[in-house]
Amino acid sequence: MKNSKSKKIRTLKYLNKPILILTVIFAIVGAFLILDASSISSVLTYGNDTPYYFFERQLIFIAIAFIASIFIIKYPTKLYKGTSLMLSLIFMGALFIVYLKNSLFSNDVNEVTLSLFGGRFQPAEFLKVFLIMYMGAFYGSWANSNRHIKFSFLVPLVLCVISAGLIFLGGDFGSAAIMAALYALVFMCVPTKDKMFNKLKVIACTCLIGAVLILKFSYLIIPESILTSDYRLNRFIYKDPCDRYEETSGYQVCNGYIAIDNGGIFGSGIGESVQKYLYLPASHTDFIFPIIIEEFGALAGIIIIIGYMALIYLVFKVAKNTEKLQNSIICYGIGIYFMLHIFVNLGGVLGIIPLTGVPLPFLSYGGSFCITVICSFAVVQRIHIENMIEKRNKKL
């Protein structure tokens, strides 16, 4: 009994305090910002009886995430390979079910979600992290082994391609693009002397650069008649959104600009946002950042970005200090996953890249994404704890 108690205390002692503090602050502040941004639309747009609907649900998601995090922190990383593969296959199966359901019973195949216990969840969000964990576990043992079956390193890549393909076919282009970029970057993090592996790294890097250039300059390359033929392709026409105010691709971004302009440096004050009064349909999800700046000012936006940068730095620091290749790859993958979501969300909201409907970590409303982000930092915490215990044992 005493041993188990002392083990718990030791585990808590080795938690990465800066990551824990920033995670808690972002989660709590994010919930209240969601309350502020959604209080009007909750009643007027979604027909809820209370302005606290999204706030209350977000608190439930946060509570679930932190409870799950306690179990993750106790779960040793040596078991990640089998568990992550099993969970990845389960969620890939869920994605396939969603794709079949949308193809057979729905005319609008742009939602990759499943209904469960009266709510909806997105298998893709969980799959992103599970596949990062599997890639880390697989390549960690693969790189350290002198004997492997020829082309065996393609196994995780095949799973990644299938996953991204299912999401793409389901119509969620934003998540599919993030998954493809994420897995390519994680793949490039694997150190190896294998010639074929390194050739694939070059191909992955070239494809990634090409994809970014296409994303950025597609409106100059692809004929406008093609881009305007589909509302999803229409998002690639993202320049000068206020000149296209009445179009889908211009309306939200232009209203986001207006919110940012209204906020100035110090903001108009808590609850004083004009744009959240139904001008921005996604004011508590994808477009929460402009609402934050409108009420709290550009300084608040800068503080949020600095906080994000600090979290990414801390995760990469854990990755660098990790002796186990598996854990290092996983940490780098989680850092990249976090960074990509920030870049794609803010890039779309600010009109730097096409709008993809990707949520902003901690601040956007959403159960699946909220739980996944917090739990992914719990994985980093577990890796940090094992690093600290290993260092302590070496000293002893």
Image (cartoon, grey):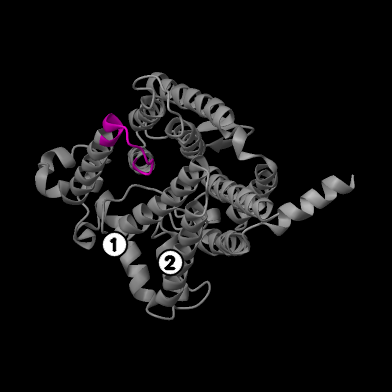
Give the total of numbered labels.
2
Q: Is residue 277 visible?
A: no
The type of residue carrying mark 2 is Ile
**Residue at (50% x, 56% y) in the render:** 315
Q: Which residue is mark 1?
A: 254
Q: Is residue 52 left or right of residue 219?
A: right
- Label annotation for residue 305: 2
Residue 179, x across and y down, in percent: 38, 39
- Label 1, residues with CA under 10 Å away: few <14, some 14-19, many ≥20: many
Q: Quadrant of the N terminus?
A: top right
Q: Is residue 227 left or right of residue 164?
A: left
Residue 325, x across and y down, in percent: 48, 42
Residue 283 in the image: above or below residue 229 = below
- SS class of the residue under badge 1? helix
Rounded to the nearest angstrom, the CA distance separating label 2 from label 1 is 21 Å
Which is in the foreground here, disc 2 or disc 1? Answer: 2
Residue 119 in the image: above or below residue 6 = above
